[in-house]
Amino acid sequence: MPISREPSPSDRLIGHLDRALRTVAGIAHARRETPRAAEASTLTPQEQRLSVALMRVNHVGEVCAQALYSAQAITSRSDGLRKHLSHAAQEEEDHLAWTAERLQDLDGRASLLNPLWWSGAFGLGLVAGLAGDDWSLGFVVETERQVEAHLAEHLDRLPAGDHASRAIVAQMKLDEAAHADWAAANGARPLPEPIQHAMRLAARVMTTTAHRV
């Protein structure tokens, strides 16, 4: 019987590099089935353009999530936190695959700036991770709470007839809330208000740009 072993630091680094390349290249593998709606989607051309823009923004958010979780896992001092971040990253990869699939169904495209979004998010994740696990967890809480609010806004803005996109976004919102709840219950340190404000400002720049590019 083969003997299993814990991944070495070099193994983990290779894994993160593989995830980074797949994310930027637009290759994502979902372990869970795409959430499905009971009703078929019916969209006017104008509604379809809106859905494409919103789902492109959501796809960018998942590109950033891959970068953030990878950077935080690399810098984590705790094996338990590292394993949780890896698990959360897989759920975020589900989201990445679901939003990419939905964009394709809508005849839309991903953001042309995904390599830029990934790089910026990875840098933020490194800073959060190097600050310490409690700060890193605080960063997870604040990020996921902001994403949860953003997804709630998208549920309000998505066309009523776009049942497929709405089913995906609703499940994503549940997952993001669970990630934030776990981090909050496991030693997250609340981020100072200026950092929260800066994160909201950066998110606004990203979502406004990705809506169009």
Image (spheres, rainbow, N blue to C red):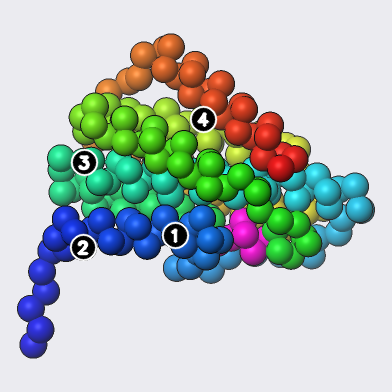
Which residue corresponds to mark 4?
Answer: 146
Q: Nearer the viewer, mark 3 or mark 4?
A: 3
Q: Foreground mark, 2 or 3?
A: 2
Magenta part of the chain: 97-102
Amino acid under label 4? Answer: Gln
Q: Nearer the viewer, mark 4 or mark 2?
A: 2
| Left or right of 145 in this view: 152 | right
Residue 30 % position (x, y): 49, 66
The residue lying at 49 percent from left, 57 percent from top is 23
Label disc, if present, on residue 204 of the rendered structure: none
Residue pictured at 16% horizontal, 63% vertical:
7
Q: Earlier in the sequence, mark 3 or mark 4?
A: 3
What is the distance, in whole Å, between disc 3 and disc 4 at their CAs?
22 Å
Q: Which residue is mark 3?
A: 76
What residue is shown with label 2?
A: 11
Seen in the picture, residue 133 relative to 48 is either above or below; the reply is: above
Q: Which residue is mark 1?
A: 21
Compared with 130, 122 (above or below) is below
Up the image or down, 200 lies above or below 183; here it is above
